[in-house]
Image (cartoon, coloured by chain):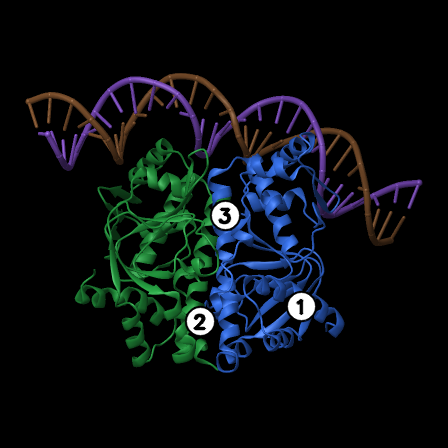
Chain colours: A green, B blue, C brown, D purple
Amino acid sequence: MGGAPSATAVTTAFARRLAQLVPLSGEEAAVLGELQSVTRSVQRHRDIITEGRHYGSIFIVLEGNGIRYRILHDGRRQIVNIVLPGDVVGVLGHVIESSLYSTKALTEMLVATIPFPRVNALYETHPRLLAKIFWWLSCETAIYAEHLVDLGRRTALERVAHFLLELLARLQSVGLAADQSYKIPLTQELIADALGLSIPHVNRVLRRLREDQLVVVEDQRVTVKDLDGLSEFADFEPSYLTRFAGGELLAG
Amino acid sequence: MGGAPSATAVTTAFARRLAQLVPLSGEEAAVLGELQSVTRSVQRHRDIITEGRHYGSIFIVLEGNGIRYRILHDGRRQIVNIVLPGDVVGVLGHVIESSLYSTKALTEMLVATIPFPRVNALYETHPRLLAKIFWWLSCETAIYAEHLVDLGRRTALERVAHFLLELLARLQSVGLAADQSYKIPLTQELIADALGLSIPHVNRVLRRLREDQLVVVEDQRVTVKDLDGLSEFADFEPSYLTRFAGGELLAG
DNA sequence: GCATGATATTGATCTAAAGCAATACCCTAG
DNA sequence: CTAGGGTATTGCTTTAGATCAATATCATGC
């Protein structure tokens, strides 16, 4: 399975985001590192979680990208989230009998596997840390809600722009996006299925955004050419990803 | 503020749902009741939470309905969730500096107000209960994800059908829907803003669903005429609302 | 070198749903 | 009884984006 050096290095993704939310004590950081010590690598295109199955662990993404999606009976696919390093998948598996969505690797991925009992054991040993993790997980709702606004009330152009900006912000928060650019294997089909659009239309929208010198998607890379212009156009307001209350979590 | 009898009676909504997920000890039930003892009533059309503000409490809905929504700069509105008894609002307020969405009362509402410090105090006194609450809250993601599928990949007809069925299932789970019918002050405008549709189109879709003897929305009441037919048509699969793993949460 | 499959691009229709506008139907308040 | 605001309904026109279809590009393996 995964090698220790790699895991340690990237543990940062999850811990870093948690630390943005609230300071972690040295011991907590150590526990967090320890939790992520059992890793598993997932091949490109393989499922981490398959709809309908039951799992006994949560998975913290250390490296690589994936998608969380559902296929409808007639073949339509909706991607409900892009899974990036630092994300946690399988949380609902603790509560709901069978998984409702599949999660699939877009690239080769490295994930830490944490059995539910180990998570639960934290009540006894590090309840504070567990609470911090839970509060943090609740933030995922904000990403989903923002996607709802995208799909419900934004035009295709705004949607794509907003989507690409969100990915930029999320990757920046884990140190994976150099200034205005990031690497991710997005195909037009993926964008279409994430945003409820058709492939040809995504193509046209991307062309438009490119012509307007706002953002370029090519190869496996997204490059934002005009951050301000794009943000304004997309009505993008990254506070749902970055603006934390800070500190208050420490209060008793 | 709220009277004790009413609060006690309806405490059930939240506790009942939690108990569906995992058994609660007598003491836990008592603590849960106690937590919900400070109540506040909110007038129709008033905000419980206003976008941009900061709050120091979570709110558990005891009675009444509301909406969680965002208004875009140009006036478009997207409702991201219908808030029903037993729901908790304001969770993100603990983590994010200023609220991202407003929550507004559709009817007069009664909510329990629980300051964050009181929630956090549970780590010390009842860590298990807190963990159960957190796991439960994580289920809200499933509702959001399902809405994403709605908005992204379902037709207007399917969307409305799915939406009305989801409300039925959610209200049933807290004992507020007699067999196939429930009372809720949904206007066509609200449905439109929840599902990313225009008002006239919602009107036509509702007429169609009525003519097909599937479901009727009138007055302040939704009546499902043909549950099987509607469910099949909407591809509705309520497991995301009801099918819990059971018991496993108790494991250490 | 060629065949194959995935992806991207472009064009030509088609359609679901938006937008606009008028009318109808409340209910409530004066 | 009447005026007025909110809501529902219906028709007509427009459009964003889907669908269908063809072609192009690129990487891969044989």
Q: Residues within 10 Å of mark 1 (few under 14, many from 20)?
A: many
Which dot, 1 or 2, sits closer to the camera?
1
Look at 64% across and 40% down and name the residue there: B227
Decide if residue B187 is on the left or right side of residue A146.
Answer: right
Secondary structure category for the residue under label 2: loop
Q: Amino acid at mark 2?
A: Ala
Q: Amino acid at mark 1?
A: Thr
The chain under label 3 reads B
Foreground of the two, A41 or B47: A41
Q: Quadrant of residue A240?
A: bottom left
The chain under label 1 reads B
Measuring from the top left, give residue B11's x and y in whole percent.
67, 68
Decide if residue A125 is on the left or right side of residue D25.
Answer: right
Q: Is residue A208 above or below residue B10?
A: above
Asked if both marks, 1 and 2, belong to the same chain, the answer given is: no
Distance, label 1 to label 2, CA atoms, is 29 Å
Q: Quadrant of the C terminus of chain B?
A: bottom left
The residue that mark 1 highlights is B11
The residue that mark 3 highlights is B146
Decide if residue A108 is on the left or right side of residue B213.
Answer: left
Measuring from the top left, give residue A45's x and y in whole percent.
27, 45
The residue that mark 2 highlights is A245
The chain under label 2 reads A
Please report whichever mark, 1 or 3, sits nearer to the chain's N-terminal start: 1
Secondary structure category for the residue under label 1: helix
